Image (tube, rainbow, N blue to C red):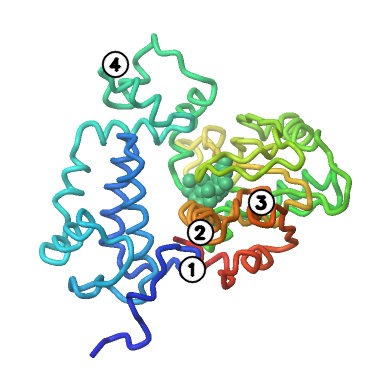
Amino acid sequence: ESEVPSFTASKVSQYSCQRKTTLNNFNKKFTDAFEIMAENYEFKENEMFCLEFLRAASVLKCLPFPVVRMKDIQGLPCMGDQVRDIVEEIIEEGESSRAKDVLNDERYKSFKQFTSVFGVGVKTSEKWYRMGLRTLEEVKAEKTLKLSKMQRVGLLYYEDLVSCVSKAEADAVGLIVKNTVRTFLPDALITLTGGFRRGKKIGHDIDFLITNPGPREDDDLLHKVVDLWKKQGLLLYCDIIESTFVKDQLPSRKVDAMDNFQKCFAILKLYQPRVDNRSYNASKEFDMAEVKDWKAIRVDLVICPFEQYAYALLGWTGSRQFGRDLRRFANHEKKMILDNHALYDKRKRIFLKAGSEEEIFAHLGLDYVEPWERNA
Ligand code: CTP
Ligand code: MN
Ligand code: MN
Ligand code: MN
C-alpha cells in the first residue's frame, strides 16, 4: 500500500524536462544538503560529482511528498551511493554530517565568501586561496591585488548585491527597462526571464530578454539604453558583450555554453525612498541627506533577433538544471542539438523553427512544461 497512490517512482524521468518542478519543495532538508555538496565539488572543479548532486537535488524537488524512509527513494533516477548515504543519515539523524563538515571546511568557507562577489568565480577564488587569503576582509586589505573593474564594483556595492532582489524591485526595474528601451524602439518586446519568470519571489539579479518584432534590428540599442542611464545617473556599472552569432551556425553542443547574443551585465541604481517615521520627528539627530535612498541591483539585458526569441526565452528562463536536461534530452534521445539560438535535427539536417516555447517542446516530442514548473 502507498500513501500517494498516483505516484510511481519508476516513472520519474531522469530528465527534469520530463518532470514538473514547482517551488513547493517537500524535501528541502535533503536538497539543501545536496546543493552544499554540489557547490563544494564545483569549488573543487569536480564537474561529475557536482552534477551528480545537482541531479539528485532536482529529482527530490519534484516529489509530491517528503521522503521519510529509504523506501521512498527506491526506483528513483539519479540516486547514487553518495546520495543514498546522505539521505539515510538525514532520515536517521535529522542532518548530514558530510554537509556539515563542508560548511565548516576552511576552503569551502573562503570560496563561498569570495564567489559571493560579483566578478569573482572559482578561478579567482583559487588564486586568492593559494595566496593565503581566507576572508573578504583580507582580500580588501591586500593592496597588491589587481582587481578587475567588475570585482572592484562587486566589492563597492557588496552589501546591496548580496541582499536578494525582491519581486517588487524586479517589477520596478522592469518599468525602467521598458521605458528606456521603448524610447528607442517603440514596439520592442521586453520579457522578464530568469528566476522571476519561474515564479520565484527573490533572486540574485533581474534578467530581461529584448526583441523587436519585424525585420528591423538595432545593434546600437543596448548602447543607447546604457548611455541614457549614464546621463540619468542610474548606471553604476555595465559590461556590454557584442554578439558573436554567425548566420546558420549549428547550435552549440556544450551543455553549459554561453550563447552568442549581444548582452549587457549591468548594475543599476534603484531609488527607493524609505519612509522612516523617525525622520519626521527626530529632526536633530537624523540627517535625511545621509540616508542612502537607493539600492544597487544586478540586471542582465539580452537582445535577440525576433526569429530566435522562443529559443532565447526558453534558455534564459532556466532553471540552469532544466536547460541542461533539455539539451541532454535533445542530444541523447532525439539526435537534435539545442541551444539558446536554435534547434537542429541531425538526422534530417534541418533547423526547426519555433515561434513559441510550446513549439520547441513539440519539436522535441515533450509535453509542455510551464515556466513555474521548471524550477528543477
Ligand atoms: N543563462 C544562459 N546564458 C548565460 C547566462 C544565463 O542561458 N550566459 C540562463 C541560465 O542557465 C539560467 C537563466 O539564464 O537558466 C537565468 O540565469 P541566472 O540569472 O544566473 O539564474 P536565475 O535562474 O535567474 O536565478 P537567480 O535568482 O540566482 O538570478
Ligand atoms: Mn537571474
Ligand atoms: Mn544565478
Ligand atoms: Mn542573470
Q: Going by the picture, which residue comes out furthest to the front?
A: 347
> Dot 3: few (<14), some (14–19), or many (≥20) neighbours within 10 Å?
many
For mark 4, what is the residue?
131
> Dot 2: few (<14), some (14–19), or many (≥20) neighbours within 10 Å?
many
Upstream in the sequence, badge 2 or badge 3? 3
Dot 1: element:
helix
Upstream in the sequence, badge 1 or badge 2? 1
Which mark is in front, 1 or 3?
1
Does 257 appear above or below 107?
A: below
Please say if the residues under marks 1 and 4 sit with CB atoms less than 8 Å apart: no
Which mark is in front, 2 or 3?
2
The one nearer the camera, 120 or 254, is: 254
Give the Cα distance between marks 1 and 4: 45 Å
Give the Cα distance between marks 4 and 3: 40 Å
Does 259 appear above or below 371?
A: above
Give the Cα distance between marks 1 and 2: 9 Å
Residue visible at 50% across and 43% down in the picture: 256
Upstream in the sequence, badge 1 or badge 3? 1
Which mark is in front, 1 or 4?
1
Residue visible at 32% across and 59% down in the picture: 56
- Type of amino acid at the residue the image marks with label 1: Gln
The one nearer the camera, 325 or 149, is: 325
For mark 3, what is the residue?
312
Please say if the residues under marks 1 and 2 sit with CB atoms less than 8 Å apart: yes
Give the Cα distance between marks 2 and 3: 18 Å
Q: Kindly tell me whether residue 86 is visible in this rendering.
A: yes
Residue visible at 15% across and 63% down in the picture: 88
> Dot 4: few (<14), some (14–19), or many (≥20) neighbours within 10 Å?
few
Q: Quadrant of the N terminus?
A: bottom left
Dot 2: element:
helix
